Amino acid sequence: MGRKYFLETYGCQMNYHDSERLSGLLESDGYERTDTEAQADVIVINTCSVREKAEDKLYTRLGELRELAAETGADPVIAVTGCVAQQEGERLLKRDSSIDVIVGTHALKSLPALVRTARSRRGAAVDISPYEDVSFPLGVARHSDPVRAWVTIIEGCNEYCSFCVVPYTRGHERMRPVAQILDEVRAAVETGRREVQLLGQIVNHYQAPDDPSCDFAELLTRVSHVPGIERVRFASPHPRHVTERLIAAIRDLPAVCKHLHLPVQSGSNRVLKNMRRRYTRESYLELVARLRDAVPAIALSTDIIVGFPGESDADFDLTLDLVARARYHSMFSFKYSPRPNTLAIKRLADDVTEAGKTHRIVALQDLQKRIQMAHFADMVGQTVPVLVEAISRRSVEELSGRTSGNTVINFPGDAALIGRLVPVSITGFGPNSLKGQLDIRPDGGARAH
Ligand code: SAM
C-alpha cells in the first residue's frame, strides 16, 4: 500500500496556496492524499499566526492528534509548517514532543527531505532558514480548485504595520520574475483553469525583477492577455500603493475583475498613525471616490481591526462613519490580537477590554450587514457574467459561481457549465449570497458578457 499524507491548513489564501505546493511536493515524492488522519503516514499542519486564536488552533490540534495516536497506536510523522513554524522554530519541540518536522515559510521545498530524515528517526528535522529563492518548480503545485489557480507573485512584506506579524513570519519582500509568473499562468490554463488569482502580501507593490517596465498594472495586462484566461483577481493590495495605472488597468482590461479589496483597518487618523498604515481617512476616502469615478460598478471590500491599543469610542465612531461612506460590498472584521515581535506589542498596551472589542465588532458587523443587503437589493434585476465554480453547497441541483465583484451567486443549472462564464439574471438574495437564473437565449446559447 502506498504511503499517505493528511494535510490541514489554517489562515489566508497564501497559506492555502502554500498547502497546494506542499501537497504537490509530497505527491512527487510518492505520497497519496488521505482525508483520514488515522490512515496517514505523514500529518502536515500548515499554520497561521496572524491572530492568537489561529496560533492556538495548532496547539489544540496537536493535543487531539496525541489522543488519536494513543487510541490507535499509529505513529505518523507530524510536520508543522508555515507561519507558526517560522515564528517559533525549535521552541515548538519543547512545547510538544510529538512534532517531528518543522518547516518555515521560506523552506517549503525542504519538506520531503525533512520527512525522510524524520522517518528514519534521526531526531526532529527543522528548516526555518530565510531562503531568498522564490522559485517553485512548474507543474508541482496541486491546484485544489478546478476553475481557479492561485499564483504567488510576491513573498514577504516590507510594510511593518505595527499590528502585523507577517514581516516576521514571511520575511522581507521578494518578487517573482514575471517570466515565471506567466509560465505558471499558461500552465494553469492548460489544465483547465479559467481564473487566476495573483497573491502577495502587498500585491500591488509588484515590480518585476527581470523586467524594469513591468509594474503591477503591466503584470495585470500581461496576465489578462494569456489566451484562455477569463478572469484575473488579486489579493491583497495596500491602499497606499494604488496607482492611477492600476485604476486604469481595472477599468480597461475586460478580464480584470471589477473588485478591489482595500484594507482600511480603521477610520481614525490617530489609530491609523499608530498602526503605521501611512494614509489618512481623507486620502483613503478620496481614493474610494476616484475608484468609483473611474469604474462605477466596482465592488470594494475591506479588513477592519477593532480595539487596537488606545482606540476610544470616538475613534471607533470614525470607523463606523468611514464604513457608512465607503459602502463596502463585503468586510472582514477582527478584534485586535497582540502578536510577537510587532511594534504594537512592544510599545502599546492592549487596553481595550474583551467586552469592549466584542461590543464594537458587533456594531460594525450590524452596520455592514445593512450596507451589504442594500447592495444586494440594488443588484436584483441585473444580468451579470458569472464564472461557474461548482455545484452549490445548498443543493445538488444548483450551481455556484461569483460575479465580477466577487459575490457568490447560486442558480439552477447543469454541472457541465462549471468553468464557463455565463450570464445570470439576479432574482433575489439571502444573507450572504445572491440568487439567480441563467439568462439563456431562445436558441439555447448563453448571451455574451
Ligand atoms: N497583507 C494582507 C493584507 O493586507 O490584507 C494580509 C494581512 S492579514 C492575513 C489579513 C488581515 O488580518 C489584516 O488586513 C488585518 O485586518 C488582520 N490582522 C492582521 N494582524 C492582526 C492582529 N494583530 N490582530 C487582529 N487582526 C489582525
Image (cartoon, helix red, strand yellow):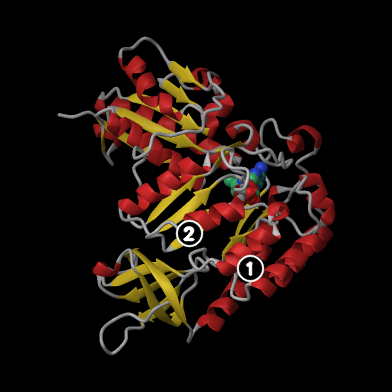
- Residue 92 at x, y percent in the picture: 52, 22
Q: Is residue 110 above or below residue 186?
A: above
Residue receiving disc 1: 328
Residue 36 is left or right of residue 248, and the answer is: left
Q: Nearer the viewer, residue 195 or 389?
A: 195
Q: Is residue 323 visible?
A: no
Query: How many numbered markers are drawn?
Result: 2
* Residue at the extreme top: 122
Residue drawn at (46%, 30%) of the image: 81
- Residue lying furthest bottom: 442
Residue at 48% x, 34% y: name it.
58
Q: Taking 400 as reference, is 189 above or below it?
A: above
Among the 4 quarters of the image, the one containing residue 45: top left
Question: As shown in the figure, which amino acid type bears the numbered disc 2?
Answer: Ser
Q: Say which residue appears at 51% left-offset and 58% top-offset.
A: 233
Give the CA separation, mark 2 to mark 1.
Answer: 25 Å
Q: Which residue corresponds to mark 2?
A: 224
Nearest the viewer among 297 and 273 is 297
- Earlier in the chain: of badge 2 and badge 1, it is 2
The answer to whether residue 55 is visible is yes
